Image (spheres, rainbow, N blue to C red):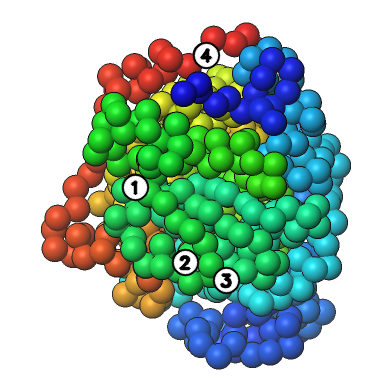
Amino acid sequence: MATHSLFSANSLHTKPSSGTHIKVEEKWLGFTALGRKPTHLKLSNGCRARAALNADPRSIEIPRQWYNLIADLPVKPPPPLHPKTFEPVKPEDLSPLFPDELIKQEASNERFIDIPDEVRDVYRLWRPSPLIRAKRLEKLLDTPARIYYKYEGVSPAGSHKPNTAVPQVWYNAQQGIKKVVTETGAGQWGSALAFACSLFGLECEVWQVRASYDQKPYRRLMMQTWGAKVHPSPSNLTEAGRKILQMDPSSPGSLGIAISEAVEIAAMNADTKYCLGSVLNHVLHHQTVIGEECLKQMEAIGETPDFIIGCTGGGSNFAGLSFPFIREKLKGKMNPVIRAVEPAACPSLTKGVYTYDYGDTAGMTPLMKMHTLGHDFIPDPIHAGGLRYHGMAPLISHVYELGYMEAIAIPQIECFEGAIQFARSEGLIPAPEPTHAIAATIREALNCRETGEAKVILTAMCGHGHFDLPAYDNYLQGKLVDLSFEEEKIQASLARVPKVGG
């Protein structure tokens, strides 16, 4: 059977205020914008968050536009390239995979993109999401730092992923598409897409990385409850999957492999489009609702962050929180340290090479300039399945190269140690992915304890860990081990990265 390529030669395969203050008692900042009071979690530790009378957090509304950081960068990011011609990808090259509006957003240099009313109506189910002061964690760490976290676990799917799943499905529905396919790691993206498809009447088919498919059966059940068909990846349903299984029948899979399988199906079926949960520009744009809300919420309580910390795999959650703050930083209005945190077992920013590479394992996607460990690098099966991706979003990679952010890598045991501290003080059980941000936040808070500095730390708590409890079980029983990358393995993978100038 001939290899299916997405591309042919010319196209794709078919401080506080000085005025009077009020107390906002035991509320999630911004949550009451919907005219309803929260019925479950409250502001941490009975925290009295102070705001000027003219900056009532209850006035925070759901953003009406997504933000595109590209418009404000002094140097524009390199374009994606056609893998056959090595020329910049044209809109028509992407049409077999994406609806027209998403292709337009992918290449847009416009600063803001209007959010459709129908999408904002769905956002109202959980947005604006809460900004919470972690008072109990501060007390546990005995730190003068003030720690805030933007909590995206209030969405129906339990993470930040519906912020882009909803618009992606809506745009496909508007174009008459009947079915979408995708990949998922931990299952957060797959469940978000299944949720969105259930709202707009589209079929949904998901290839879930085998390691996470086995580790997280309830994510699969969540997807199936919303009507999705779910396959472990690699699978025997696609040529890409069969090739991997022939080489390694017990392959744990990777996001790169799962992407190849989903893209193969989309490219072969005219009534089917592909949806991606991270990495691409339009996905990052959609996630900026997080940071736009957070800017207003922090302004309402008279705070400006000194540190903004988020986990990174493909990068959508990190971009969603940080990009609006980078805009303000570029304007000279604030100067926070912006820090990405990645798993030590899959350190694309800190150990990868900035070069053109495929977004998937089989080499069916455009070439994107990004920090990569090599498109056929298969990370060890850490519990943060959503961070097991060989590359970093091209736009985040570009911002990193420009020096507007920094990156560190943390092993998973330290992450789960931080998660337990967080859960036992703040009450929320984090998903394995944001435990990386929590661990880095704790590091910085302890540094403040040593220096005596009362820094403001803002961190991204992108989802809850209710379906990740087996990982906590492994940690609590002492079975969790630190998995780190093998230098030889990465070098071998990087040797197979295509040679492209630029």
Amino acid marked by disc 1: Arg
Amino acid marked by disc 3: Ser
Residue at left offset 66%, top offset 61% = 202
Of badges 3 and 4, nearer the viewer stands 4
Cβ atoms at labels 3 and 1 below 8 Å apart: no
Residue at left offset 66%, top offset 28% = 13
From mark 1 to mark 4, how far is it between C-alphas? 27 Å
Which numbered disc, 3 or 4, marks the residue that appears first in the sequence? 3
Label 2's element? helix
Residue at left offset 69%, top offset 15% = 9
Q: Quadrant of the C terminus?
A: top right
131 horizontally vs 191: left or right: right
Q: Can the viewer see residue 428?
A: yes
Which numbered disc, 3 or 1, marks the residue that appears first in the sequence? 3
Q: Position of residue 30 (x, y in %)?
A: 68, 77
The circle on residue 498 is 4
Amino acid marked by disc 4: Pro
Amino acid marked by disc 2: Gln
Which numbered disc, 1 or 4, marks the residue that appears first in the sequence? 1
Which numbered disc, 4 or 2, marks the residue that appears first in the sequence? 2
Of badges 4 and 2, nearer the viewer stands 2
Cβ atoms at labels 1 and 2 below 8 Å apart: no
Label 4's element? loop
Of badges 1 and 2, nearer the viewer stands 2
Q: Is residue 365 above or below residue 415?
A: above
The circle on residue 224 is 2
Q: Quadrant of residue 110?
A: top right
From mark 3 to mark 4, how far is it between C-alphas? 39 Å
Residue at left offset 52%, top offset 14% = 498
